[in-house]
Amino acid sequence: MAPILRSLYDSPGRLIHADLHGWNVNVYRGRLTVLDFDDVLGGQPVPDIAITFGYYRGHADYPAWLEAYEEGYRAFGEWPATDRSVVEALMIARRLICTNYVLKLPGDWTESLAEREKLFEKYLE
């Protein structure tokens, strides 16, 4: 994973959302708006894209969604996620980080961990 992370810093950082998903997008006065500023920070665009992709990876319309996301992104700038294997590795890393967070919370997380195990199996297919 270290070579992947090092390669990301070949491009300049920028302001990223770092947690963009459907629950953070709202319609205001007929326009889509992004809300939820707790994760907004300076960073690299490829991990930001991987986080967003990770939320939708299991959906049936995932391929069409990817295409639409990339098309929308390109309307505002160059597409930085040219290596799909890097994006996949970063999606897995994000899921591992989230799983580690869950393990630190009090309570019985057996059911949640079983669901996460299925997600990891899908990533590794």
Image (cartoon, rainbow, N blue to C red):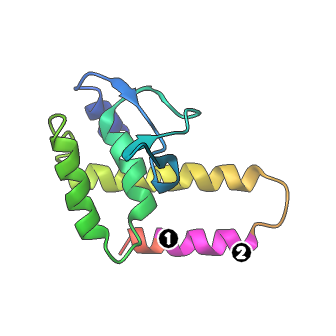
> Which contiguous range is marked in magenta?
110-120
Q: Name the residue under label 2.
A: 111
**Where residue 108 sits: x, y (%)?**
82, 67
Q: Name the residue under label 1.
A: 119
* Overall secondary structure of the magenta section: helix
**Where residue 38 sits: x, y (%)?**
59, 33
Residue 113 on the magenta segment? yes
Which quarter of the picture shows residue 11?
top left
Q: Seen in the image, is 67 located left or right of residue 65? A: left
**At 22% across and 43% down in the image, what residue appears?**
73
Q: In which quarter of the image is the C terminus?
A: bottom left
Rounded to the nearest whole Å, what is the CA distance between mark 1 and mark 2? 13 Å
Residue 107 visible in the shown view: yes
Residue 90 visible in the shown view: no
Q: How many marks?
A: 2
Q: How crowded is mark 2: few (under 14 residues within 10 Å), some or many (20 or more)?
A: few
- Which label number is shown at residue 108? none
**At 22% across and 58% down in the image, what residue appears?**
68
**Where residue 100 sits: x, y (%)?**
64, 51
- Dot 2 amino acid type: Glu
- Residue most extreme to the right: 107
- Dot 1 amino acid type: Leu
**At 16% across and 42% down in the image, what residue appears?**
74
Which quarter of the picture shows residue 5?
top left
Q: Which comes before the other along the chain, label 1 or label 2?
A: 2
Q: In which quarter of the image is the N terminus?
A: top left
